[in-house]
Image: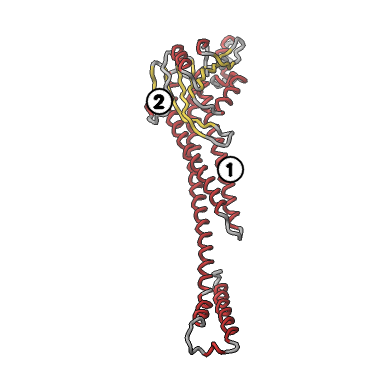
Amino acid sequence: MIEVYRSDEAGQMRAERVAAEALPAEAVWIDLINPTKTEERAVELLCAIEVPTREEMREIEVSSRLYSEDGADFMTASVVFGLDSGAPKFAPVTFILSGKRLVTLRYTEPKSFAIYSAKLCRDPSEGTFRQALATEAELAPLAVAAAPAIRPPKVPNADAILIGLLETVIDRVADMLEAIAADLDRIATDIFSASNRKKPTANSDFKSLLQRIGAAGDLISRTRESLATLDRMMPYLQFVLDGRKSPKDAKARVKAMSRDITSLNDFDAFLSNKTTFLLDTTVGMISIEQNAIIKIFSVAAVGFMPPTLVASIYGMNFEFMPELHWTFGYPLAVGMMAVSAILPLIFFRYKNWL
């Protein structure tokens, strides 16, 4: 599927799905979503590039993800998708700057693309660079005819669209980390509330906690992988924009994204440490529960040893045992067994072993 973005006569950005043979030459952004060979070939002919294959997008070498070829710049990063469904995953997305066009190649549907697409079509200035406004003192000597020259361009361009799209991608990664942090807080509450209950925690509860912690840990590690691809992409993007003579605003926004990625990496490391702490706490609680159960059986075994000894003595079949002929021999043996069982329990309670 091919989705193209171009501005109309009023300068408004329009998104439309087109067939391969109807690909417009004035498109500023071409979004390839699960493209067929015919659609890939049409984009290659229009932009004079070679679209990478799905296997090439999965390569982990930097040289395979960030490179220039045929006058175009190729950048591949792992982008989160499925966050709203509760099962977030990551998939590679390739961004291609070819002349005045941006081409994106993806085989998933990240929400960040839909968010930025709606924002771009609603406000075309999202696809332009925001020039710094001059002060009144600086504008005073200027002629009225020169005023339009300092206004930001109205027509969106590929560089600004790419930067805006990457900013939205990073925002979605931040949203996912916030969701993971909230989930870890709920897990911590469940763990420590379970430790306050006198009733032993069931194995199914511990299994559920471990599964939730494991899922959070997996997401955190994969988020770090995604942030690593974005972090490697920023210096290369800056190099590409410098070569394309992009405005200073582009450089400032790329630096801001780099700082955001650094802060997200730090937060990711914090969440990783918290996940390890919660995992250790859960395993420790499992050990405590197991020790408590083993202690109960150990105390029970020790408690029943004296009665067993008394019963064993009077269960012997010797001929000369005077107690066998006593009238009160049986009640005496039962009483001895009861007293020998109660005394150890009292002692254990005194020592706070029970």
Pinpoint residue 309: horizontal percent, then vertical percent. 50, 79
- Label 1 neighbour load within 10 Å: few <14, some 14-19, many 20+: few
Is disc 1 placed on a helix, strand or loop? helix
Q: Quadrant of residue 4?
A: top right
Position of residue 65 in the picture relative to residue 270 (left or right):
left
Alpha-carbon distance for marks 2 and 1?
36 Å
Q: Is residue 350 above or below residue 116?
A: below
At a point 53% along the width and 25% down the height, the residue shown is: 165
Which residue matches tag 1? 182
- Quarter of the image with the C terminus is bottom right
Pinpoint residue 277: horizontal percent, then vertical percent. 50, 50
Which residue matches tag 2? 56
Position of residue 38 in the picture relative to residue 339 (left or right):
left
* Mark 2 vs mark 1: in front: 2
At a point 40% along the width and 25% down the height, the residue shown is: 56
Disc on res. 307? none
Asked whether the viewer can see residue 247, the reply is no
Q: Which residue is nearer to you in this view: 330 or 258?
A: 330
Q: Which residue is nearer to you in this view: 161 or 207?
A: 207
Q: Is residue 260 above or below residue 26?
A: below
- Label 2 neighbour load within 10 Å: few <14, some 14-19, many 20+: few
At a point 50% along the width and 13% down the height, the residue shown is: 20
Residue type marked 2: Glu
Pinpoint residue 148: horizontal percent, then vertical percent. 58, 12
Asked whether the viewer can see residue 323, the reply is yes
